[in-house]
Image: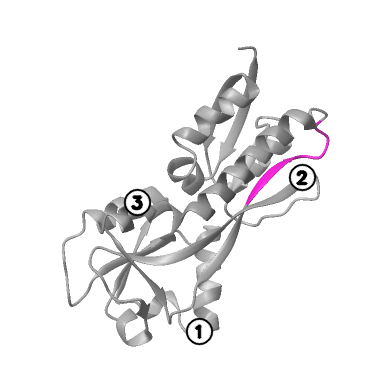
Amino acid sequence: MNEKINLGASNTIGSHILPGEPLIELSRIINGQVNLTILSSEKIIDGVKEGIFDLGLIESAIFDDTLVYKKWIEDELVVCSKASLGESIDKEMIIHCQLLCRKEQSPTRQLITGFLKEHELSYQDFDSLMEVDNTTSAIQSIKWSKPNKEHPTVTIVSRLAVEDEIERKELYLSRIEGVPIVRNFYIIYDKKRDDSEKLEAIINYLITQQTTTERSS
C-alpha cells in the first residue's frame, strides 16, 4: 500500500453514508489508505482549494469557479419524528411541533427557510425552536426524545441519514404539505489536478455504488 487519498465529507455524508463498505472499497480501488475528515461544506471547499483534500463530498451547492463539481446523489430532506405524524404535515400541525433545527448560518437551514417561505411558512410557525450543530445530533436527539402528543419534537434531516431507523420503525418521516424538499450532493475536486485517472476511478465507484443502491431499494 503506497497510495493515499484525503477525502473531505460533510457531516451527513461522512457520518451516515460513507462508513462501512464504501470506505473499504475505496481503499481497495487505490490500493492504499483513505483518510476521511468530516467538516462543513464550506471548509471542505476551502480544503480542496488548498490541496488538503484530494476529493470533497458536499451536501450544499456552494459553487467555486476553480473546482470541478459532479452531481452525485439526489437527497430529500424530511421531517423526522419519534412517533408517526402521518405522511404530510400542514400548518395546523406545525404550530404544535417543537423543532430541532440547524444553526442560522447553516446552508441546510437556509435551504429549508426558502422552502418554508414558498409555502407561506417560517421557522417561527413552530411551537418552539432548539438549535443543534449537525445531523447526527439532531437524529440522536429525536431518538431519545420523550413522547409528547401535544407538542411532538421533530427535526428536518436527510432521508438517507435515517433510512435504517425508518426501516426498523425507530423513527418516522413526514413531508411538509406533502411536498418533497430535494437537493443534490456533489463530488468536487480542483481543476488543476493532474492525477485525473485515480480520481475518476474513485468517482466512478461512488456514482456506480449509489446507482446500484438505488436500484436495489
Question: Which of disc 1 and disc 2 is earlier in sequence?
Answer: 2
Q: Is residue 51 left or right of residue 181?
A: right
Q: Which residues are magenta?
A: 186-193
Is the residue under label 2 in contact with that under label 3 (CB below 8 Å)?
no
What residue is shown at x 27% (from left), y 58% (from top)?
A: 142
The residue at which mark 2 appears reads as: 67
Q: Residues within 10 Å of mark 2 (few under 14, many from 20)?
A: some
Is disc 1 placed on a helix, strand or loop?
A: loop
Q: Is residue 202 left or right of residue 179?
A: right
Q: Which mark is residue 46?
A: none
Q: Which mark is residue 164?
A: 3
Answer above or below: position of 27 versus 149. Answer: above
- Amino acid marked by disc 1: His
Is disc 2 placed on a helix, strand or loop?
A: strand
- Amino acid marked by disc 2: Leu
Question: Which of disc 2 and disc 3 is earlier in sequence?
Answer: 2
Answer above or below: position of 3 versus 76. Answer: above
- Amino acid marked by disc 3: Asp
Q: Residues within 10 Å of mark 3 (few under 14, many from 20)?
A: few
